[in-house]
Image: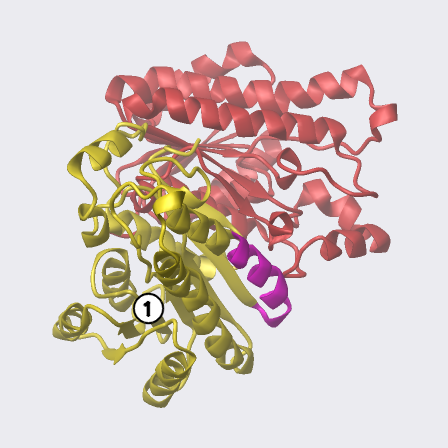
Chain colours: A yellow, B red
Amino acid sequence: MRLANKVAIITGASSGIGRSTAYLFAKEGARIAVANNINVAGGEETVASIKASGCEAIFVKTDISVASEVENLVKVTKDKYGKIDILLNSAGIFGSTKETPIEDTDESLWERVYAVNVKGIFLTTKYVVPEMKKASGGVIINIASMGGIRPVGPRNAAYLSSKGAVITLTKALAIELAPDNIRVNCINPFMTETRMVKQLPAEVIKAAVSTIPLGRIVKPEDIAYAALYLASEESSMLTGASINVDGGHGI
Amino acid sequence: MNITFDNKVAIVTGAAGGIGRVCAELLAEGGAKVALVDYHPERLAEATKNVQKKGIAQGYRLDVADTSAIAPTVSRIRQELGEVDILVCCAGIAAPMLAEEATEAVWDNMLAINTKGLFFCNQAVAIQSMIPRKSGAIVNIASVTGIIGMPPPFMTVAYSASKGGVVQITRQEAVEWAKYNIRVNAVAPTMVVTDMTKELLEDPEGKAAALNLMPLHRFGEPYDVAAAICFLVSDAAKMITGVILPVDGGQTAQ
């Protein structure tokens, strides 16, 4: 088992990439704290499935854009499992699933997208890092997006730019935290078959998949396996990396 | 699914060198039949013997700069081990030189091995085994020097050019061969502790300068790079193609 005795916090694990990664990490030996806010039933279901397979997990309802809730998430996880080795920031929102030109972008939409996609990672990192420093190391994995590199597809500058911010945040933190042996990397998925992507119009999905040289939609498992590599000791020389899992879309 | 290579045939070029040797071992341990390819007969024999302790392996002598010998070697490997599923191109050389002092002979030799030799290995394996079977995974060894410029005292002009070529060969093949379900990726290591970097790392000033490039403040070990390669050629990475993965302790994040 590649994550034996590890403890991982996974945000946004009520479905899609977060859930798929939670299942894989649990199978590889990690104990998981599932954190999400809106889809509580989904988060609890993820925990129930992990437990049913004989592994360990807890659910901690958390709005990652609120500092006190993130502090609670870290505390509850630490009290339950004694430490935190891995933080996977998978929670994210589009804010809008239709064409959203900049002049039609409400301030509230912009703020909500940045609160979850960017501030959320700032806060989880801020409160997890002291625990990782105490443990002399750790791994942080952020789910960014190919939209942060090539902002094509439906107009949604809030979402696209927030993912660019995640990529730069990853690199800045990688440099800042390297002396503490905390590795920070991100994964850039493209058009992944998740609940979130399924909210997009079918023709948007079809058009996007036609730009993938490998010719198929990305599966949550494709992202989970990249996350497993980044979480394991096998990648101990990788930090600040940004891995495209996109079937070649971004080449 | 996990990282296993049961029933796969893998070719590793430069298999007697630091990274290639560990990579061949990991592939063999994972169940692959491994063809070790290297130009140096004694080191090749020794590396092959080592890998045979872990699994099935056979050595093939080849100088990748001799492009006419590449396709026949791949044919022999196919006859003896079977159709090739995995190709890892580690064969390469380095030579320090200031840009204003670079000579044509050194330049030509570097590009002949690191870039041209690597491409024709990719091409031969793709044509013979991968395109006909619509399946395959290739990993080329690039370098951080193929992505960014290096500060003094590093004198890498020809090496950087050769590795920049590897980066673009990798991307172009990934796009062209995606329709054959062939994935082509590269790893871009920083300074790894091997014979290639021995001289530099024995010099205290060179060593300190190199360490300062890397936020994680340590040199790469061959295992770091070999593990990244094994991830990229495995089914765990089956949606990843055209990627240049730095294994660099954060050097290119800066």
Left or right of residue B138, residue B163 in this image: right
Residue B68 in sight from this viewpoint? yes
Helix, strand or loop for the magenta stretch, by majority: helix
Q: Give me the residue at 39% from left, 24% from top.
A: B175
Residue B80 sits inside the magenta stretch: no
The magenta stretch spans which residues?
A: A168-181
Q: Position of residue A221 (x, y in %)?
A: 25, 51
Left or right of residue A113, residue A205 in this image: left
Q: Give me the residue at 37% from left, 33% from top.
A: A248
Instruction: Please name whichever residue, B197 or A66, is drawn nearer the observer in this view of the structure.
Output: A66
Q: Give me the residue at 21% from left, 44% from top.
A: A200
Residue B155 in the image: above or below residue A166: above
Instruction: Please name whichever residue, B220 or B56, is drawn nearer the observer in this view of the structure.
Output: B220
Q: Residue furthest top?
A: B68
The residue at which mark 1 appears reads as A10
Residue A149 in the image: above or below residue B79: below
**Amino acid found under the numbered disc labelled 1:** Ile
Q: Quadrant of the C terminus of chain A?
A: top left
Residue B80 in the image: above or below residue B137: above
Q: Position of residue B38 (x, y in %)?
A: 55, 29
Instruction: Please name whichever residue, A82 or A17, is drawn nearer the observer in this view of the structure.
Output: A17
Q: Give me the residue at 82% from left, 31% from top.
A: B97
Element at badge 1?
A: strand
Chain containing the residue with disc 1: A
Left or right of residue B95, residue B23 in this image: left
